[in-house]
Amino acid sequence: MKGSNRTWSALPPALLLTAGCVVVEAPTTEVTGPSTIVLQPASTRMVFLGQTKQFRADVRDAIGQFRRPSITWASSDGSVFTVDDNGLVTAVGDGTAELRATAEGTTATASVTVEQTAANIRVLSGAGQRALAGTALEDPIVVRVVDEGGTPVAGVTVSFTPAEGNGSVSHESVEVDAGGEASTSWTLGGDRLGTQSLGVSVGTVENVVKAFAAPETPIPDLAIEGPLRLVTETPTDLERIEVSVRVANTGDAATPGTFPLALSADGETVETFEVEQLEAGERVELTYVLDPLEAGAHEVAVALDPADEIEEWFEHNNGASTGFSVVRQRVIALGDSVEVSSSTVDEVILFRIDVAEAMQKVLEVRLFGGTGDADLFVQYGVRPGTQYEYECQSGEPETSELCQLVPVRAGSYHVAVHAFSSFGPTTLTVTAVEDPIEPFDIEVRFAGSFSAARQDVIRDAVKRWESVIARGAERVNFGTQGFPGRDCVPDGPLVTGQVDDLLVLVGIDDIDGEGGIAAMGRPCVVRTVRFTRATSTTYLETAVGGIVLDESDLAGLEEDGMLSAVVSQKTAHVLGFGFDGDRLWGRHGLLADPVVDSVAVPDTHFTGPLAIAAFNAAGGTGYAGARVPVENTGGPGFANDHWRESVFGEELMTAVFTSRNPPLSLITIESLADMGYGVDLTQADAYTLPTPGAPAVAARGRPVVRPIRLFERGGLLVKVGPPHGK
């Protein structure tokens, strides 16, 4: 075989006859000749000292079979790179050298080039200095040029270039020393105040050094920091528009005693306000209110010192603007009926209902008739950002929708009709009726042994809340498979079929012995609703809850006449009152600054607007802390889950009470309304906030730590969560 290093020794083939076929046996060969070595990669270029590159040597015998012999690696110049016993090359210095791999007497080579390249310019000193405009900085600007691995690069030239109008330098081009360092002196520009910039570069590698140029006589500098912010991102043509702005004095002297800020809409000045004096470096958040604007696109702007009467460093930072859209919202009154339709999928049509006088009635908003699919949403008070945050969410498959809110409150209700598909013509009606279609019913089931007398006391205490909750809830169907009540209370029965509206399971257990925790209550099944195009789930009323009584304390509670009060309080926890465990304050974002450890003592407070108004009406207008104050000491089951005893004294939902009949305040009832329950405000007991610090002692409760099950409308199990804290 011409040109081959292989030598073949052939023997004559033998012919065998097998079943009519001729089989030719392959000749026996004998392999001779040296191995071959191929290095991968064949060459490499390295750009920083300490950089590594792994090489591999493939060794084959004379007929091309892979072999694994011992390989010896070597560098032809150790000042360029080194190599270890496994072929790992490490860059040492600039140059080109040969990598050698030897095995079984054969050597292969690869070229390795090291070209240390600048990758970063570090500012060692001189940045951030302050000097009078037009004067030299006290300290020079010193930089170091390094490669990608952080090793100084020698032999390169650094360019120092001040930005336009930012002064001059003593040396524009400087060759670095052996340590990669270079320096220059910088004289600031005389016609520019504030921050000035000096560019530093080596080829395409750049950095910027900044210094501060101050005026010879200190003066202020008014500035708008950040964008203008609208409190409501998409206001309606019925809503006033709150504009927030951050104003700063970034100069080195105080502003005048007052200075003007002009607020304009669509290029026309609406009003000019006087802002109080700001010291050097001081900032303030300001909010201004515009009257409603017509539906459509608009721009709002603010300008500080619009007449340029104040001498300051810069004028360019005195203004800011933002564009936004105003959407249409129609006013409808109680008793009104309007026709609604839409040919645009996902269009949201807005209405507002203004109520002059509060009534313990039901506000009933209906949508009916027509074709297509429209959904209905109703919210009292402040209009949320999206319809999926409204209190009432009705999403039947056609256009037959109903929302009932109770009581009818003085103020504004917001109505949103969402076109899930094109729909109409559909009729929207708003009325105030005496009773809801369905009242709120509570069923009590007992797990364990309870005497008839005990059952009567417990049942009456639980069902007291039927008169407080004034609106029924969606039925939850557990089917025949059911919900295991033992996940709610010990020995709880299997819950099957429909629950309408609330099922309370009552059990007995050895909680902690006599004198400790007398009872515990919590939600076990919570209704939820999630619309197809919503990004979040809305948590509704509790469907199944559990109350567990401590077997060691039960007789004592009866003897002291406290059983009814304790059970009534735990029923409120079943309804969702509280934050920890599976209660609903957290689900609705109604608790601020919760206690999270035993060290910090935050000002924990409930943020529901209805409860805050009731707190103020009960004597809380002079309270100095955040409202409504929630217990922030005492540990789990005490903090985060009850009204603060030092402020409320003895009220049903404080963690400590001694009275057999602690009052159920309007504050507590309104807190349930903030969670989305329809309530009867006339069921509140007379209550006024006592003097802070009223003493009280009693049983403390905490939630049962068990899984919570969340149900969609119709009873579909959508989540089984782990025990809280697990």
Image (cartoon, rainbow, N blue to C red):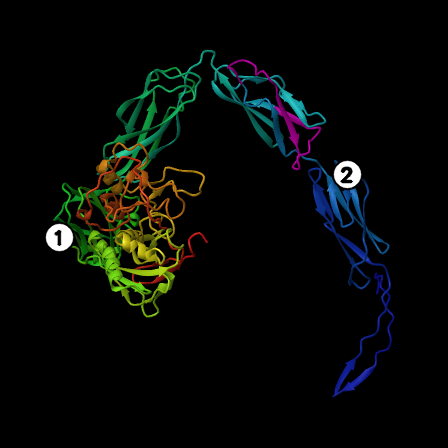
Which residue bears the numbered disc 1?
A: 434
Is 147 above or below relative to 546? above
Which residue bears the numbered disc 2?
A: 80
Decide if residue 361 is on the left or right side of residue 312. left
Decide if residue 61 is on the left or right side of residue 510. right
Mark 1: amino acid: Glu
In this view, the residue in front, 171 or 707, is 707
In this view, the residue in front, 652 or 439, is 652
Instruction: Determine the residue located farthest toward the top in the rendered image.
Output: 217
- Disc 1 secondary structure class: loop
Instruction: Determine the residue located farthest toward the bottom in the rendered image.
Output: 19
Give coordinates of residue 141: x percent, y percent: 61, 21
The magenta stretch is 130-159
C-beta proximity under 8 Å, tags 2 and 1: no
- Disc 2 secondary structure class: loop
* Circle count: 2
Specify whether residue 403 is in view. Answer: yes
3D distance between C-alphas at marks 2 and 1: 94 Å
